[in-house]
Image (tube, helix red, strand yellow):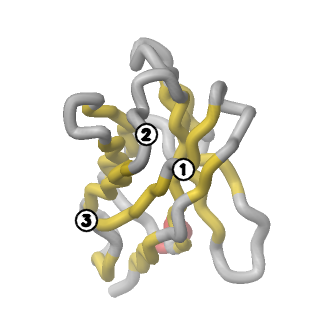
Amino acid sequence: QLQLVESGGGLVQPGGSLRLSCAASGRTLDHYAISWFRQAPGKERERVSCISSSGDVTKYVDSVRGRFTISRDNAKNTVYLQMNSLKPEDTAVYYCAVGPGCYLINYWGKGTLVTVSS
């Protein structure tokens, strides 16, 4: 059974940066696509970014493109989301999710809270 644990969330001022990590255990991530989702209070969960199993394809929602960067380190069985130029509207619980493709999710983490506020 694959388990995912997110970390790196917290309180940051607008314009600041955070790096989220998603560490996997139980299985290796080598053959999985990995996505980051977020859910803000009162809103539906949305996909923020996805990286293919090979790491050579990345996708971003328009609202974060150019500010967020997804990456993976298969040796550490970990995926990252570097978030720069954060805005208050980025405030949400961020989840990592894993599956055979970006649109096929088999496993979810429990999330980490990101709050962007002055």
Considering the numbered disc 2 on the image, is that residue within a helix, a strand or a loop? loop
Picture coordinates of residue 91, whole percent (x, y): 51, 73
Callout 2–callout 1 Cβ contact below 8 Å: yes
* Residue beneath the point at 27% across and 61% down: 18
The x, y position of residue 87, in whole percent, is 44, 66
From the image, which quarter does the C terminus lie in? bottom left
**Which residue does the numbered mark 1 point to in the structure image?**
1
Residue at the spot of label 2:
27
Circle 1: residue type: Gln
Near mark 1 (Cα within 10 A), the count class, few <14, some 14-19 or many ≥20, is few
Depth check, mark 2 against mark 3: the one in front is 2
Point 76% across, 81% down: residue: 42
Q: CA distance from mark 2 to mark 1?
A: 7 Å
Q: Who comes first in sequence, dot 3 or dot 1?
A: 1
In space, the residues marked 3 and 1 are separated at their CA atoms by 36 Å
> Does residue 105 appear to the left or right of 3 in the view shown?
right
Q: Dot 1 lies on which element?
A: loop
Give the mark, 2 or 3, whose residue is nearer the N terminus. Answer: 3
Q: What amino acid does circle 2 point to? A: Arg
The local crowd at label 3, few if under 14, some if 14 to 19, many if 20 or more residues have their Cα within 10 Å, is some
Classify 92 as above or below 53: below
Q: Residues within 10 Å of mark 2 (few under 14, many from 20)?
A: few
Quadrant in the rendering for residue 46: bottom right
Comes first in the chain, label 2 or label 1: 1
Residue behind mark 3: 16
